[in-house]
Every structure is written in structure tokens, then in C-alpha cells.
């Protein structure tokens, strides 16, 4: 028997999208497999690694712990909403300048988490940055350059303001 | 790592949600923040036939604090909301201190206090805090509503006093009387991880400086929050006072009493002996802090 489908309508990166989804479809799989937005990565599927972090109504959340059907009427932002290869977002620019990534698996989740963090804390100290990063695992960098990149992005944004 | 199939219900009112739960009973689960339920479903540890999503029910979302400090936490109040609330910080500092230790920022953005309590993970900070603060849990169902004391609410690992048709609609915390001091301390391997051991302390002293009420509650020490009567007995009647050496001796005695009154299970990261050691050290420090804080909020002497 075919699984029941639920109609949903949501905003993804500013564009309205409609779809039919089975209730158990995780938002992370909906974003990657149905929308083809493969910037959102999936590491653990139980909320621990942070690779799948997206913004849900502007607030960082685990896409692997939300069902797509729950996002009906809500707005989602993924890493694809940040910059383009020609025009990187200031955070992406800072990550490139500071070598804040190696394999890049963790990076989209970290960027989305830090985008919201810097909007609320434009002048964070190192301890605050490290605390805000606690929900994102990186197996490559040792975090030092990630912290440096976030501090640089904050400084650049303050200078520009 | 994909959840099993289920039917999804998104009621818009509390009455509708309760009717659905009454109809489906154990087959159905409420979905609040999903930060414990969805991982368990992804692992296929639980396979509910129906999920009743609470997130569209506006009436469940309120956090209210009276001027006197009486706090009501509705079923959809997220950890992050409590963490960022100035009135909670002022009137219920134990909750404010402990909630920062619960999970990571992204998880606190979705996870709810009531969902955390209904989940009843014995390693969780919040059940211990609610027992220490003598919270009242308001359970509602199609049959009516009742109030359950926190000490009776937690009945074992992932097990509470809620019946299969009941929703935890609200948690109520009474204002802290003058002369009360609190502290929460835990040790986790990384910030945001479940603690290897955590201790919540509430002490109250009267105008003469004598301890009239004490609660020392552990998380991670058994299948539910564990309130140590032995540790409280050391504190009751004592005068923590302002002499640092005397306070240290008292705190260490109460910490030692706690350690001998628990029988921790041991985990992959911490043996039972190490957990007992942590309980003793954390309790002594938390008790000293709570007593010092109580001394700064002494009730005024009556004539
Ligand atoms: C990576 C990670 C780390 C974490 N670390 C910690 C930690 O250190 N400490 C800690 O305490 N927690 C931790 N958590 C769990 C987190 O606090 C959860 O938010 C919380 O335990 C559950 O709240 P929820 O709203 O997400 O509930 P859900 O996951 O939606 O529900 C949990 C259970 O409670 C039931 N339920 C939910 N709401 C109600 C209600 N109102 N009435 C009756 N039943 C209800 C559900 O049916 C389900 O069975 C962690 C989670 C993750 C993913
Ligand atoms: S994939 Fe979602 S937190 Fe790891
Ligand atoms: S850069 Fe490889 S996991 Fe972070």
C-alpha cells in the first residue's frame, strides 16, 4: 500500500515551494533529494553532529530532527541562500581567508549556525564563539581556524556597518 | 537511520490534541520539539503509529512569570526561551543555570521543557531541577486535569506518572522565599553533552542564619532524579554562616553524605566509582555556592 502523502507549502531560500510528502520524510532528505539542494549535509541523523543545521523561521535547527511535513507554512534557509561562487557571503569569505575548512563536510551547518549567531552577537569574544560552535562537530580543522574565521567575519561586518 | 511510517496529525487546539491522544492511546505520541523523539524514531527505538504535532497549538506556548516570581511554563516553551528570559534569571536562577547545560544551541531552539520532562531521561538536568524546586506538573486529558508533584512525576527511565491519554500542559514553580540560595553543577565531556553527573541544590536559611530547608538532587545517579535525604539532613539546622572554613567543612560533609546515599549505575564514560566521586565533589561545591547565595538574600528579621 502506498504511504499517505501530505501536501505542504513552504518558503525555501525566499522562494515558495509546494510538494507532496510522506509524513516520515526528514526535512534534511526533503531538502537534498526533493529540492536538490545538496549543500545541507547529513552526518549522524540523530541531532549530534550539526552538519544538517538550517534556519527554520530564521532560527538554527537540525534538519534531521524535523519532518518535512512540519514545515508547512514556515520558512527555511539553507547554505545555498548565503553567497554565490562569484559573490561569497562575508562569512564564507572569512572561512576562505582563514582556512576555516578542510573537507567542508561540517561547513554548511557551521555557516548557518554562525549567520544567526553573528546577527544576535555582532561583537563576540572567543569564548562566546566557541560556545556557539558547541553543537557542530568538525573532524578536520581542530576548530582554531573556524573560530578565527568567525571572529574575522564579525570584525569585517562591524567595520562595514 | 530513517524513521518508520506513521500518520501525522496537526491539531490547532488543545481539545483536538487531547481527543486524538485519547483515541489512539499508547499508539500515538505527542511531537513537541522532536529533539528526543525524532532521534529515537530514526534509530527505530520507538515506532509510534500516529504523531500528534503540538507545534500549531498557540495556547500551549506561554511562559509567564508574576512579579513575585511564580513561573508557568507551557508545553511549547522552548529551552532557548527560558534561557533568554530575564525574569527567569532573576526569580528562578536554578532553572536558568541548569538550562544552559542542556544540549547545544540548535537543540535548545527547538526542544521544550515539558517535552524534556515527559521524556524523563534520567541523565537530564531538568527533572532534577524540578524535583529540587518542588515543581508542580499540570497534566490534562479529555477526562480533566490534575496536578502532580515533581517528586512523584518521575517513575523510572523514560517513565512518568502521565497516563496514556495525558499531556503535560504546564510546569509551575512557586516563588523562592527570601533566604533561599541555589546552585547547579555538572560535569560533561563536552559542553551540551548529557552530564556524567549533575547536582542541583536548594538551601534556605532563616533570619538567624540557620538552615531550615535543604534539597540536594542528582541527575545521572539512577533511573530518576535522586533527592538525598542524608545530605539534606547534614544541612538542616546547621548555620552555614560566613566563615569560609566552617562553610567548607559543612559542604564537604553534606557532599560525602550524598556520595554514600547513592548507587550510580556507571556509564560507558564514567564508572560507578567515578560517578560517586563526581557526586561528592560537585555537591560540596554546589552546596557551598548555594549557601553563599542564600546569605546574600537573608530574610529581614521580624520584631
Ligand atoms: C544532540 C543532543 C544533545 C542533547 N543533550 C541534552 C542534555 O545534555 N540534557 C538534556 O536534558 N537533554 C538533552 N537533549 C534532549 C533535549 O533536551 C530535548 O529537547 C528534550 O529532551 C525533549 O524535548 P522535546 O520538546 O524535543 O520533546 P520531543 O522529542 O518532541 O518528545 C519527547 C517525548 O516526550 C513526549 N512529549 C513531548 N511533549 C509532551 C507533553 N507536553 N506532554 C506529554 N508528552 C510529551 C513525546 O511524545 C516523546 O515521547 C539532547 C538532544 C540532542 C539531540
Ligand atoms: S545530521 Fe543532523 S545533526 Fe547530524
Ligand atoms: S572541515 Fe572536514 S569536518 Fe570540518
Image (cartoon, coloured by chain):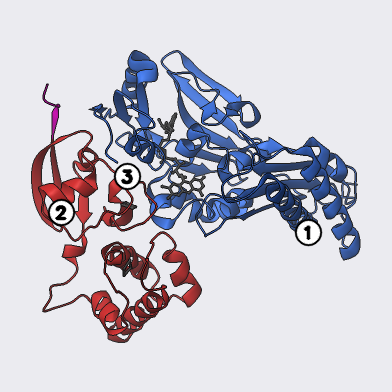
- Residue displayed at 19% across by 68% down: A82
Q: Position of residue B116 (x, y in %)?
A: 48, 39
Q: Position of residue B60 (x, y in %)?
A: 40, 35
> Callout 3: helix, strand or loop?
helix
Residues at marks 3 and 1, CA–CA distance in whole angstroms: 41 Å
The spot of residue B237 in percent (x, y) is: 90, 43
Q: Which residue is mark 1?
A: B292
Whether label 1 touches label 2, CB < 8 Å:
no
What chain is colored red? A
Residue at the spot 50% in from the left edge and 55% down from the top edge: B192
Instruction: For ligand 1, tell me if the residue under mark 1 lies within 8 Å.
Output: no
Label 1 marks which chain's residue?
Answer: B
Locate residue A60 relative to residue B114 in the image: left or right: left
Instruction: Classify residue B88 as left or right of residue B62.
Output: right
Q: Does mark 2's beta carbon lie closer than 8 Å to ligand 2?
A: no
Task: Tell me the quarter of the picture where residue B233 sits.
Answer: top right
Q: Determine which of the numbered discs, if any, sits on residue B58 in the image.
A: none
Instruction: Tell me the quadrant of the picture where the N terminus of chain B can be found.
Output: top left
Report the predominant secondary structure element of the magenta stretch: loop
- The magenta span reads A1-6
Q: Secondary structure at mark 1?
A: helix
Which numbered marker is on residue A12? 2
Amino acid at each position: 500500500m502506498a504511504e499517505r502523502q501530505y501536501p505542504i507549502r513552504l518558503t525555501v531560500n525566499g522562494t515558495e515551494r509546494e510538494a507532496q510528502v510522506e509524513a516520515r520524510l526528514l526535512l534534511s532528505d526533503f531538502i537534498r533529494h526533493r529540492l536538490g539542494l545538496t549543500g545541507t549535509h547529513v552526518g549522524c541523523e540523530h541531532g549530534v553532529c550539526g552538519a544538517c543545521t538550517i534556519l527554520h523561521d530564521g532560527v538554527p535547527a537540525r534538519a534531521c530532527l524535523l519532518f518535512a511535513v512540519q514545515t508547512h507554512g514556515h520558512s527555511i534557509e539553507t547554505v545555498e541562500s548565503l553567497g554565490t561562487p562569484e559573490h561569497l557571503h562575508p562569512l564564507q569569505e572569512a572561512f576562505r581567508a582563514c582556512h576555516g575548512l578542510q573537507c567542508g563536510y561540517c561547513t554548511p551547518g557551521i555557516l548557518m549556525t554562525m549567520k544567526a549567531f553573528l546577527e544576535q552577537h555582532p561583537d563576540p569574544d572567543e569564548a562566546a564563539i566557541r560556545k556557539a560552535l558547541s553543537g557542530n562537530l568538525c573532524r578536520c580543522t581542530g576548530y582554531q581556524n573556524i573560530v578565527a574565521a568567525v571572529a574575522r567575519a564579525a570584525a569585517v561586518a562591524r567595520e562595514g556597518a | 537511520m530513517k524513521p518508520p511510517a506513521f500518520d501525522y496529525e496537526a491539531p490547532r487546539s488543545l481539545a483536538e490534541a487531547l481527543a486524538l491522544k485519547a483515541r489512539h492511546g499508547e499508539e500515538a505520541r505527542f511531537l513537541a520539539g522532536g529533539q528526543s523523539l525524532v532521534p529515537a524514531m530514526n534509530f527505530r527505538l520507538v515506532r509510534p503509529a500516529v504523531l500528534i504535532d503540538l507545534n500549531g497549538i498557540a495556547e500551549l506556548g506561554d511562559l509567564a512569570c508574576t512579579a513575585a516570581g511564580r513561573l508557568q511554563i507551557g508545553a511549547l516553551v522552548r529551552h532557548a526561551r527560558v534561557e533568554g528570559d530575564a525574569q527567569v534569571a532573576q526569580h528562578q536562577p536554578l532553572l536558568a543555570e541548569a538550562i544552559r547545560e542542556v544540549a547545544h544551541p540548535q537543540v535548545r531552539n527547538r526542544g521544550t521543557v515539558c517535552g524534556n520532562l515527559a521524556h524523563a531521561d534520567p541523565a537530564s538536568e531538568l527533572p532534577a531541577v524540578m524535583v529540587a524546586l518542588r515543581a508542580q506538573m499540570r497534566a490534562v486529558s479529555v477526562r480533566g486535569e490534575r496536578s502532580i508533584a515533581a517528586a512523584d512525576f518521575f517513575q523510572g527511565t523514560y517513565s512518568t506518572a502521565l497516563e496514556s491519554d495525558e499531556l503535560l500542559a504546564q510546569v509551575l514553580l512557586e516563588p523562592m522565599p527570601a533566604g533561599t540560595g541555589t546552585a547547579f553543577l555538572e560535569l560533561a565531556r563536552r559542553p551540551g553533552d548529557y552530564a556524567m553527573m549533575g547536582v542541583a541544590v536548594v538551601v534556605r536559611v532563616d533570619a538567624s542564619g540557620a538552615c531550615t530547608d535543604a534539597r540536594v538532587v542528582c541527575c545521572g545517579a539512577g533511573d530518576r532524579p535522586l533527592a538525598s535525604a542524608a545530605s539534606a539532613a547534614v544541612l538542616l539546622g546547621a548555620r552555614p554562616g560566613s566563615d569560609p572554613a566552617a562553610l567548607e567543612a559543612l559542604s564537604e560533609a553534606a557532599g560525602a553524605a550524598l556520595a554514600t546515599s547513592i548507587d550510580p549505575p556507571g556509564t560507558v564514560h564514567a564508572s560507578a566509582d567515578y560517578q560517586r566521586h563526581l557526586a561528592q565533589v560537585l555537591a560540596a561545591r554546589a552546596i557551598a555556592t548555594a549557601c553563599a547565595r542564600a546569605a546574600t538574600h537573608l530574610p529581614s528579621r521580624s520584631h
